[in-house]
Image (cartoon, rainbow, N blue to C red):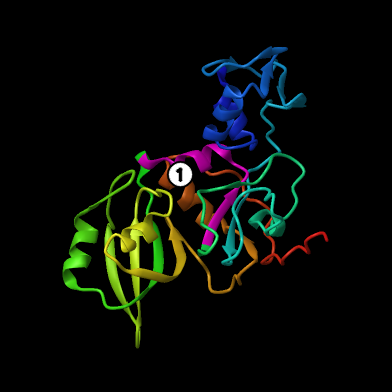
Amino acid sequence: MAERLQKVLARAGFGSRRQIETWIRDGKITVNGKLAELGVTVADTDLVKIEGRSVSIAADPTRTARTLIYHKPAGELTTRKDEAGRPTVFDNLPRIKNGRWITVGRLDFNTSGLLLVTTDGELAHRLMHPSWEIEREYAVRILGKVDEESLKRLQDGVMLEDGMAAFASIQDAGGAGANHWYHVIVREGKNREVRRLWESQGLQVSRLIRIRYGPIELPRSVRAGHFQDLQQDEVKALYATVKLDAPAPHVMRRPGKKRRRPR
């Protein structure tokens, strides 16, 4: 049965739907020797190439998607390459033979914590799409005193450069001295949304850690710069969140160590 090209390639793990749509617009994908267009459908018998390289789109019953928890440290980028040579999260991920790793959203350079990484482009697409309203929970340390009026405004909604934004929840997590911790939840995932919301009230974020994405929490056992495969019950919960069937179990691995970056 023919399906839309971006959906087929995303399911095969070549990228998220949004990323593949960008490749189609940029003329990087061909179908049977012709430049692909948005909306084109393909079947298993069609010849698909990405940047001149043939890719298999046939369903493979022996292949299963893999999803990891990666504990991103501050000081790493979530891009694949950096012209300035700064470290990226992909430096520390395990190598895979088929498909490619797709990050579920991004964490900025100075933010640490939970980053979900998957080979399933359709899963990544749904988890990131605002229509699903997936909760992202952060532990945030604020420098200075926060008054009740500011907390109320942050939950009622604040106008940012790209529209209204608000915290779905704010919980006091304690602290001493000039710094105070809060746990906050957002459901949209706008660029630097958590930092910009606090800054809109004249407050400074001194530390920001993502501790949960949907039903998946950051385990204490996974140290910064290391990864861990999701347990099968976590896989089922994550896929159920966006109404997808969970794949077959992947061979579990111990928490992975950092790969040494080439000099």
Q: Give left or right: position of 256 versus 202.
A: right
Local packing at callout 1 (Cα closer than 10 Å; few below 14, some 14-19, many 20+) is some
Kindly give the residue lying farthest to the right in the view shown: 263
Q: Give left or right: position of 13 versus 158.
A: right
Q: Which quarter of the picture shows residue 180?
A: bottom left
Q: Is residue 244 above or below residue 33?
A: below
Q: Is residue 68 above or below residue 144?
A: above
Q: Secondary structure at mark 1?
A: helix
Q: Residue at x 69, y 39 (%)?
A: 99
Boundaries of the magenta span: 114-130
Residue 223 in picture, x, y percent from top left: 61, 72
Q: Residue at x 62, y 29 (%)?
A: 9
Q: Which quarter of the picture shows residue 169?
A: bottom left
Residue 203 in picture, x, y percent from top left: 32, 69
Comparing 159 with 168, the one in front is 159
Q: How many marks?
A: 1
Quadrant in the picture for the C terminus: bottom right
Tag 1: amino acid? Met
Quadrant in the picture for the N terminus: top right
Q: Is residue 68 above or below residue 54?
A: below
**Is residue 10 covered in magenta?**
no
Q: Residue at x 58, y 30 (%)?
A: 20
- Disc 1 target residue: 128
Residue 157 in picture, x, y percent from top left: 22, 53
- Does residue 260 appear in this view? yes
Residue 95 in picture, x, y percent from top left: 75, 51
**Is residue 128 covered in magenta?**
yes
Comparing 240 with 216, the one in front is 216
Q: Residue at x 35, y 39 (%)?
A: 131
